[in-house]
Structure formats: structure tokens, C-alpha cells
Image (cartoon, rainbow, N blue to C red):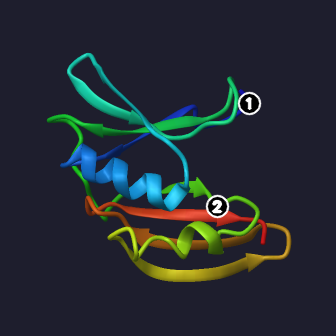
Amino acid sequence: MANAINWFEIPANDLDRAIDFYKKVLGGELQKQDIGGFQMAFLPMDGEGQVGGALCKSDMHIPSAEGAVVYLNGGEDLSTPLSRVNEAGGEVVMPKTKISDEIGYFAFFMDTEGNKIAFHSPK
């Protein structure tokens, strides 16, 4: 097993608002699609075989600040996407924090839907 995780979904109450937020924060386009009764918007992913994810709106997807936390790739330095969070309508709830020299840094933010999400980067 190459990765313990192969897919993740971030719940959204207002999919268009969530798309706008993540588009601004991540600096990339999201592809919107309806699949099996779910409204989805796929987060940017580099190449096939990578771990991917989507924003999802359905009766089964309820935004929450509790429970599992998704760590998004913050690039080389998570300061860049984190600096866009407040401007995009979210809130940084834990600033960039060093874990260790080997592991890098992380930060927590609340998105426009009420989800607690994290960034990770080596610098």
C-alpha cells in the first residue's frame, strides 16, 4: 500500500462559495461535477496516481470543525496559501508552527463552510 489515504472529501453547504474560497487560497482551478447525487468540485492535483480530493455537497457531507483534519499540501512554504485565507473569507486559527527540522511546518484554518483544515510544508 503506497498511501494510507487515496481520496478525501471536504464538506460544503454552499459549493460555489467553497469553490471560490479554495480557488483563491490554493491559486488553482477546481473542476465542478455532479456525480451520483453529489455536487463535487475537484481540488487541483498533479498527475495520476496521486492522492486527490474534492469539495462535496450532499446530505451526507456536513461541515465540521470537529473530527478528522485534512492536511493540504502547502507547497514549499505554507506561508503563501495561508496568507490568502483571511482575504478569501476564512480564518487562520493556528499560525504557521514548526513541527521539527525533519517534518516541517503546519497551520490550521477555518474555511468558509466551517471546516477546520490544515496546511503542511517543509519550510
Work out whether mark 1 precedes mark 2 in sequence or the reverse, and give the earlier one: 1
Side of 71 where 92 appears, left or right:
left
Residue 91, quarter of picture: bottom left
Residue 56 in picture, x, y percent from top left: 31, 38
The residue lying at 78 percent from left, 66 percent from top is: 122
Q: Which residue is mark 2?
A: 74
- Seen in the picture, residue 14 relative to 9 is either above or below; the reply is below
Q: Is residue 89 above or below residue 1?
A: below
Instruction: Work out which quarter of the rendered image holds the N terminus and state it.
Output: top right
Between residue 8 and residue 39, name the one nearer to us: 39
Is 70 drawn above or below residue 88 in the view shown?
A: above
- Foreground residue among 113 and 94: 113
**For mark 1, does the 10 Å Cα neighbourhood hold few (<14), some (14 to 19), or many (20 or more) residues?**
few
Would residue 7 be found to the left or right of residue 46 on screen? left
Q: Viewer-proximal residue, 76 or 5? A: 76
Q: Which is more foreground, mark 1 or mark 2? A: 2
Residues at marks 1 and 2, CA–CA distance in whole angstroms: 21 Å
Residue located 31% across and 65% down the image: 65
- Disc 1 target residue: 2
Residue type at mark 2 is: Gly
Residue 78 vertical position relative to residue 97 in the rendered view, above or below: above
Q: Name the amino acid type tagged 1.
A: Ala
Q: Quadrant of the C terminus?
A: bottom right
